[in-house]
Amino acid sequence: MAKSRVQFICQACGNVTSRWAGKCEACGEWNTLVEEGTAGGIGSGPASMRSTRKGRAVVLTSLSGEIEDAPRIASGISELDRATGGGFVRGSALLVGGDPGIGKSTLLTQAAAALASKGHRIVYVSGEEAVAQIRLRAQRLGVANSSVELAAETNVEDILATIADGKRPDLVILDSIQTLWTDAAESAPGTVTQVRAAAQTLIRYAKSTGAAIVLVGHVTKEGQIAGPRVVEHMVDAVLYFEGEGGHHYRILRTVKNRFGPTDEIGVFEMSDKGLREVSNPSELFLGERHAKAPGAAVFAGIEGTRPVLVEIQALVAPTSLGTPRRAVVGWDGARLAMVLAVLEAHCGVRFGTHDVYLNVAGGYRISEPAADLAVAAALVSSLTGLALPADCVYFGEISLSGAIRPVAHAQQRLKEAEKLGFGQAVLPRGSEEPGIGAAAFQPATLTDLVIRIAGSLRRDTDD
């Protein structure tokens, strides 16, 4: 019998090393290396267990041929179907991540009940809750009478043997991947080896039978799905369920999808009866807007294929500290530093003696650089004490030279703004023909926008 070899695996990134160290060389995390044996299972690789097995020839084919669209199972929850690209694809594996208590189990319970009501066989397996706890949630959501099949089990082999009885399930929900363990690996549940091995076994089952698999994953304090990042590469789609504790909305964000668009979002509102769909998220994020407050600008953004209008709030206040504070919520702090530097270097707007606070209203998070122009307008508005026009939207990317660069989907942004009653827009030159018409202002540089805001301040003073 071959001698077992010991290796150390990082529980944060999955990096494998032969010696223990306090700090992982790959990701830089401390105290994450755990000793795991490689006598069998995933640690030693398939070849060590089946060294005498001969290879099986597979059929080779050509690139040309008929292409069949991936058959989907629509849940009927439009925001969930939007995020998944039209529904669950048969034979696919989907990973759903999110903070504890954010509503992952609630969403999947509602989706399971909706699919079961259409005649699909849905199996819900929980490794964290007992069957009675799941039933209590179903009663609260009003779906206790649905034909969803429940189980409380953590062993992968037992789960597969259970769902193999009877008709093949259309969808299997496993909550969560960190609680599952397989006989093929000898390490403890929740370790990198077990998570990888369990995910590999379940994905193999999905591909061979055509059943869709949904894996629930916890997230770390940095907001990434716990366990090895290799799991994200193994599955076909990755969805993050986001939301702030002080807000009642939830966002289901697509970060990977082999069968549909990425960067798509679905918006939900949490209530005592479960998650409610929000068909128009722009109204949600602009619902409590104060139109006459300085330092507020409406940004017309794009999330996947959906335009979203959100308010960006800035507060520029004098400081007595030697080093002014720069605080950002919902946007990139490095991007804010760049916009401040461009305003100082090319527009003569000084922030060196002021604290700067930036917030995206509603706890929403913006990742696209098209928000640069709205952030700059909000900063100048707060510094001068002038409220921007209430019916104006802003979007455009700012370069280090102070020029304003065009961004994609300008027409979609403007159509959404018009639909919500906005009559003015500040956008880059070179964009598609603006639909707002004469009320569209297209500055070539950031200086033009600052002069326009300062000019309106002087006009108000003269009046």
Image: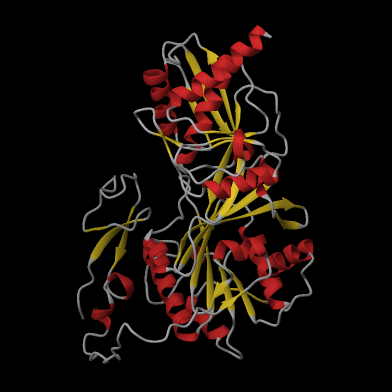
The image quarter containing residue 56 is: bottom left
Percent x, y for residue 378? 56, 26
Q: Residue at x 49, y 75 (%)?
A: 92
Marks counted in the figure total 0
Front residue of 190/320: it is 320
Percent x, y for residue 144? 77, 71
Residue 443, visible in the rendered structure? yes
Q: Which residue is drawn at 34% across and 28% down?
A: 401
Front residue of 262/124: it is 262
- Residue at the front extreme, as displayed: 438
Looking at the picture, the colour scheme in use is: secondary structure
Residue 316, visible in the rendered structure? no
**Horizontally, is 158 left or right of 36 in the view?**
right
* Position of the C terminus by quadrant: top right
For residue 43, above or below residue 60: above
Front residue of 360/65: it is 65
Percent x, y for residue 447? 44, 22
**Horizontally, is 330 left or right of 345 in the view?**
right
Percent x, y for residue 387? 64, 22
For residue 54, above or below residue 366: below
Q: Which residue is drawn at 50% across and 46% down?
A: 432
Front residue of 156/78: it is 78
The image quarter containing residue 418 is: top right
Q: Residue at x 57, y 20 (%)?
A: 382
For residue 406, above or below residue 450: below
* Position of the N terminus by quadrant: bottom left
